[in-house]
């Protein structure tokens, strides 16, 4: 999601996506290249409602467990076809 005065943040997120793709191609056959670029993560596990929650496609703000589960999945054999 873009917001005013967030050019550096947006550029960094785009750079991570481009770097991930390039590494996936360069490391093909040796390793998979993936990244996790989450949006709003609340480390206090607070539950948000209304506009704060609805602005996210998932309908809620993320928490650290969401990221941990993603990492575990990407490191598992179940994600063997996922790269880039």
Image (cartoon, rainbow, N blue to C red):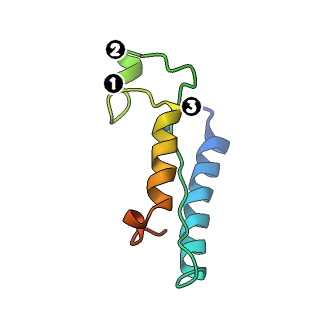
Q: What residue is pinned by disc 3?
A: 4
Residue visible at 58% across and 73% down?
22
Residue 14 position within the rendered picture, expressed as x and y whole percent measured from the top left:
57, 55
Q: Is mark 2 on a helix, strand or loop?
A: loop
Most foreground residue, 71 or 33: 71
Q: Which residue is drawn at 41% across and 16% down?
A: 48
Instruction: Count all numbered tags in the image, as a single digit.
Output: 3
Q: Nearer the viewer, mark 1 or mark 3?
A: 1
Task: Tell me where residue 19 appears, x and y as whole percent.
Answer: 61, 65
Compared to residue 49, the image places residue 37 above or below, namely below
Mark toward the start of the polypeptide (2 vs 3):
3
Please state if 80 lies on the left or on the right of 10 as rendered.
left
Quarter of the image where one finds residue 42 = top right
Determine whether the residue tagged by mark 3 lies in a helix, strand or loop: loop
Q: How crowded is mark 3: few (under 14 residues within 10 Å), some or many (20 or more)?
A: few
Q: Which mark is residue 17?
A: none
* Residue named by callout 2: 50
Give the alpha-carbon distance from disc 1 to disc 2, as whole Å: 6 Å
First-in-chain label (1 vs 3): 3
Contact (CB < 8 A) between labels 1 and 2?
yes
* Number of other residues with Cα within 10 Å of mark 1, as a class: few under 14, some 14 to 19, many 20 or more: few
Residue 54 x %, y %? 33, 24
Measured Cα–Cα span from mark 2 to mark 3: 21 Å
Q: In this view, does 50 lie to the left or right of 23?
A: left
Say which residue label 1 marks: 54
């Amino acid at each position: 999601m873009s917001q005013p005065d967030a050019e550096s943040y947006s550029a960094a997120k785009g750079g991570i996506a481009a770097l991930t793709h390039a590494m996936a191609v360069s490391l093909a056959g040796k390793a998979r290249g993936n990244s996790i670029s989450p949006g709003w993560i609340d480390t206090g596990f607070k539950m948000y409602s209304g506009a704060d929650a609805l602005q996210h496609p998932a309908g809620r703000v993320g928490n650290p467990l969401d990221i941990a589960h993603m990492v575990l999945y990407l490191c598992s054999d179940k994600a063997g076809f996922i790269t880039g």
